[in-house]
Amino acid sequence: MKIAVLPGDGIGPEIVTEAVNVLNALGETFELEEAPVGGAGYEAAGHPLPDATLKLAKEADAILFGAVGDWKYDSLERALRPEQAILGLRKHLQLFANFRPAILYKELADASSLKPEIVAGLDILIIRELNGDIYFGQPKGFRRSPDGAFEGAREGFDTMRYSVPEVERIAHVAFQAAAKRDKRLCSVDKANVLETSQLWRDTMIEVAKQYPEVELSHMYVDNAAMQLVKAPKNFDVVVTGNMFGDILSDEAAMLTGSIGMLPSASLDANNKGLYEPSHGSAPDIAGKGVANPLATILSAAMMLRYTLGRAEQADRVENAVKKVLAQGLRTPDIWQEGATKVGTREMGAAVVAAL
Ligand code: IPM
Ligand code: MG
């Protein structure tokens, strides 16, 4: 099994190192190959997604990704900014199904800004479509406004679009995931306003006929944003488009109070996947040794489960993480009075020891 290791920018290299240590401690022989991506790719090869990095990602069975982005690249033209690396990988590798679980570990029940009774036992899975929508829809660009009250003014425009087969493939992924959980799937859209969403909703209803065991509901995205903070435990699996999923998955992550704990998987039709923490590159704390490596370690566990077919090893890693939390070890992002404050390396080493 070959794993492409793409640490990226900011805290990326520190947290990926810990996840690699965990993989190496499992007693399996994985072939790991590292390559620069994001700002690091730009520094090394003049592009956020260098050809050699893309080639490695294509060849590998799975990709372990850290994070990309740094303020110092904000003034580059869009095509050269670090974010284009992750968008490019998603598109080139057709990683269309993004799994973003939001789980509240009982040891961290007080970390949420919501009342404990609202979030205790929270276990939501957000499935976000990752290859379409307004992120990739053409045409997009800048132009002179062709009509309306501001005719002639400079304007920016993007295109929201989804085709039926595109919605069908993410629908199947979502129904199958829901069937393995509590069998409730909530599809989030804006069908009261957008044609794209009407087609999304109609397609979800069609595909639902093949999954009678799963209960499908629909919710407008504004209401979903509200319900996520009002009664988050009413959700089991949420499926939504690229843009709404970007926003709602950050909101769901913060319900747990600790985005530093949440892994994610982006899968293609054959379960090949890119695995990354849900959080970003946090350039403000890069190199300080304080970043929480657990989201990346848990992403490696997802990789073992979904792509590498090693569910038992995934269980071992997840149990090791629960064990270090039970031991009271906390990086600063999840630290509370009475717990033992540790840095990135100590946290990673504790997980390896618990294995
Ligand atoms: C995410 C991020 C990305 C996105 C950025 C970095 C392009 O916010 O993975 O959620 O918008 O998809
Ligand atoms: Mg995001």
Image (cartoon, rainbow, N blue to C red):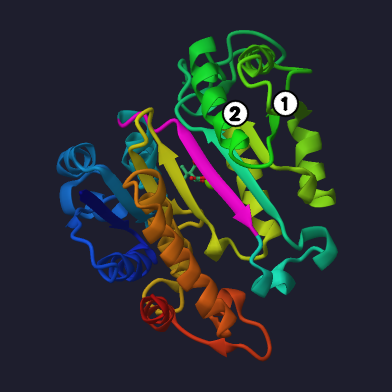
Q: Secondary structure at mark 1?
A: strand
Q: Secondary structure at mark 2?
A: helix
**Residue 52, x across and y down, in percent:** 14, 42
Reading the image, the residue beneath label 2 is 175
* Majority secondary structure of magenta residues: strand
**Residue 178, x across and y down, in percent:** 62, 35
Q: Quadrant of the C terminus?
A: bottom left
Please indicate whether residue 228 sits to the left or right of residue 15 in the image.
right
Please indicate whether residue 224 sits to the left or right of residue 147 in the image.
right
In depth, the one of 295 and 283 nearer the eye is 295
Judge whether 138 appears above or below 276 on screen: above
Q: Which mark is residue 145?
A: none
* N-terminal label among 1 and 2: 2
Judge whether 353 appears above or below 229 on screen: below
- Residue 101 sits inside the magenta stretch: yes
How many marks the image carries: the answer is 2
The amino acid type, in three-letter code, at marker 1 is Leu
* Residue furthest to the top: 147
Q: Which residues are magenta?
A: 93-103
Q: Which mark is residue 216?
A: 1
**Residue 99, x across and y down, in percent:** 52, 42
